[in-house]
Image (spheres, helix red, strand yellow):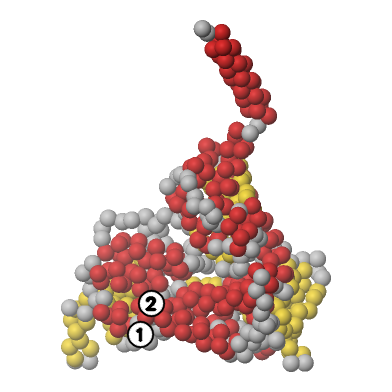
Amino acid sequence: MAWSFKEGLLIVTPRYDLVVIGGGTAGLVSSIGAASLGARVALVERDRLGGDCLYTGCVPTKTLVKSARVASLVRRAEEFGIKTGGVEVDFPAVMDRMDEAIRVAGEHDDPDYVRKQGVEVFTGHEAHFEGPDRISVDGRRLTTRSAIIATGSHSVTPPIKGIEEVGYLTHVEALELRRLPRSMVIVGSGPIGCEFAQIFARFGSEVTLLDTVSLPLPQEDPEIGALTKRILAFDGVTFRGGYRVEEARKEGGEKVLTATSEKGEKIEVRGEEVLIAAGRAPTVDGLGLENAGIELQEKGLRVDENLRTTAPSIYAAGDITGKYLFTHVAEYQGRIALRNALFPIKARAEHRVVPWTTFTDPEVARVGLTEEQAREEHDYVRVFRHPFGGVDRAIADGETEGFVKIVTGRRGRILGGHIIGPDAGNLIHEVVLAMQENIPIQTLSQTIHVYPTLAQANQRTADNYYREKLFTDRNRKVLSAFFALQRRLGGKKRQTSHKSP
């Protein structure tokens, strides 16, 4: 306990081993993990426990992805010999299912559950640093030996004249809709933009996707972006790449966006709703970082390899670090941060092998370097591909769109893996493990894979390593000579055997 006086009154302030600010994935992992080790822990969350992933990110959007995929599959039913009476999307029912998924998935994020794990929980409260070891929570002071900031990130809106007056949605408001918009313009073609574009198009909205880049998913390999553009077009999404949105206005009950290309060409795109999915920024408002000596950079808090901020006793985890804005990275960083915040021997956060998936249909999964990045950083780069159209299980499933692409360096070392195809988010993990453990591509080829499975796409891609190594003109000539010699020797042995008494 710490003791202080205020206006003649004795104030008793608890002393914590760890105070965690932010109750999303990183905050929950670090606080519950620390409490399980016997530490005295407080968790402060100004809204609801569970964070963006539970309420406005992974859980609800993947629920909608599934519903949209079912709608698409039913439309294709005759391909599989099944006749249906057509497809009618009950949008309110779809959103009700999403709410139920959030409720069930959030049971372990309930404050009472977290308290039972030994964490003192403050929900609906703002946290404000008074110093590196003092945190004010709605007038109550918490003193602590160390702290973890896990306040996440939020959507940002690019400077568009008139957009505030016209009104727009972010992914948060899009998940609150209960009536399907007739048409929608989405600004931003990263993972969020592409997923929502396909979702709403499959539900029946007329969707236009706008971005300054020439291909959707600009962080991915260009081959992936090109195929994604074609897949979205098949679902009815119009992609307008190379245009920057400059102005918004209302006209005839619609919202109209004016966009300009680098060459000065202007276009107008209109829709009943506008969804902005053009980036995110760290959430730090009201924290009082300056009081604790914590430095904020453009994309997030400045942290070292141990996830320590510029304040020696304060660490950060999750989106607030600005490194990789993924839930699985937040979980990983939460574990590293709690260890370093509590113990003197520090663990290093290793981000060399970080996979991610965009949950369009088919999915897009990646780990490591693109082909272009690999050629810039390494020599002797080799690229191996295999289409899902050459995988028997994909043929049987009627899901042949896409390919596996593995980028290697010397001696078959895997530098990057890229998959666009059915269940890519699961298939990528074999490549992730290979990279993590420095397993060369030839081992993937030699590993027995179950037939018929989609995972054979990875093996077939790796088989190409040996095809390139062994099936050369020079090797064929040498082996042809070897086999010819074996045939002659075999003939002589048979002749000798016939002459024997």
Left or right placement of residue 411 versus residue 257 in this view: left
Q: How many marks?
A: 2
Nearer to us in this view, 48 or 499: 499
Q: CA distance from mark 1 to mark 2?
A: 9 Å
Residue 487 lies in quadrant: top right
Q: Earlier in the sequence, mark 1 or mark 2?
A: 2
Q: Which residue is mark 1?
A: 123
Please tell me whether mark 2 sits on a helix, a strand or a loop: loop
Q: Is residue 376 visible?
A: no
Residue 50 lies in quadrant: bottom left
Please tell me whether mark 1 sits on a helix, a strand or a loop: strand
Left or right placement of residue 453 versus residue 7 in this view: right
Dots 1 and 2: beta carbons under 8 Å?
A: yes
The quadrant of the picture occupied by the N terminus is bottom left
Left or right placement of residue 468 versus residue 154 in this view: right
Q: Is residue 180 visible?
A: yes
Please state which amino acid type lies under the numbered disc 2.
Gly
Residue at the image point whose x is 31% and y is 56% from the top: 346
Residue 448 spot, x, y in % from top left: 48, 46
Residue 143 spot, x, y in % from top left: 26, 76
Residue 100 spot, x, y in % from top left: 46, 84
Mark on residue 297?
none
Nearer to us in this view, 204 or 83: 83
> Counting other residues with Cα less than 10 Å from the Cα at mark 1, is it few (<14), some (14-19), or many (20 or more)?
some
Residue at the image point whose x is 19% and y is 84% from the top: 12
Mark on residue 23?
2
Nearer to us in this view, 167 or 98: 98
Residue at the image point whose x is 74% and y is 67% from the top: 242
Q: Residue furthest front?
A: 501
> Counting other residues with Cα less than 10 Å from the Cα at mark 2, is it few (<14), some (14-19), or many (20 or more)?
many
